[in-house]
Amino acid sequence: MGKWLAGQAVALATDRAMQTQGGMGLSKEYRVERLWRDARLLKFAPVSEEMVLNYVAQYDPGMLRSY
């Protein structure tokens, strides 16, 4: 859950930073572009969000496997 929550938090924070800077957020002059690319990586590497949520659903409440 920590990996999933951290991925969600960093994605939201960098998305807000990109929205704040507008078109200049995509410019390499500012670090927001690099942070945004790195934040995208946290959402699916090394394990995708769906796999994390499937694992939690299987082992936390004791439900059957969904994948």
Image: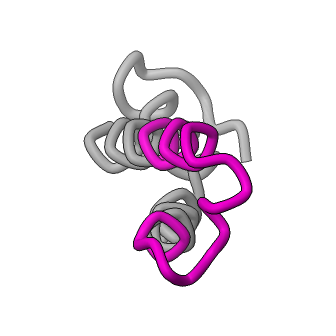
Identify the colour scheme used.
one colour
Q: Residue at x 60, y 60 (%)?
A: 25
Q: Is residue 20 left or right of residue 60?
A: right
Q: How many marks?
A: 0
Examine the image and state in which quarter residue 15 appears. Answer: top right
Task: Give the camera-side residue of 48 and 17.
Answer: 17
Residue range of the region highlighted in magenta in the rendering: 11-34
Seen at 49% across and 33% down, the residue is 58
Q: Residue at image x 45%, y 72%? A: 30
Residue 41, image x and y in percent?
Answer: 53, 71
Answer left or right for 1 relative to 64. Answer: left
Residue 23 in the image: x percent, y percent?
73, 57
Outermost left residue: 2
Q: Is residue 44 magenta?
A: no
Q: Quadrant of the N terminus?
A: top left
| Outermost residue, top side | 61
Q: Which sits in the foreground, 13 or 28?
A: 28
Hey, which residue is sitting farthest bottom in the picture? 28
* Residue for point 55% across, 38% down: 20
Specify the principal SS of the magenta part: helix
Query: Of residues 34 and 61, which is closer to you in this image?
Result: 34
Q: Determine whether 34 is above or below 2 in the image.
A: below
Question: Residue 55 location, x and y as percent?
Answer: 47, 43
Residue 65 image position (x, y, % from top left): 63, 38
23 over 31 or under it: above or below: above
32 in magenta: yes
Q: Which quarter of the picture shows residue 60? A: top left
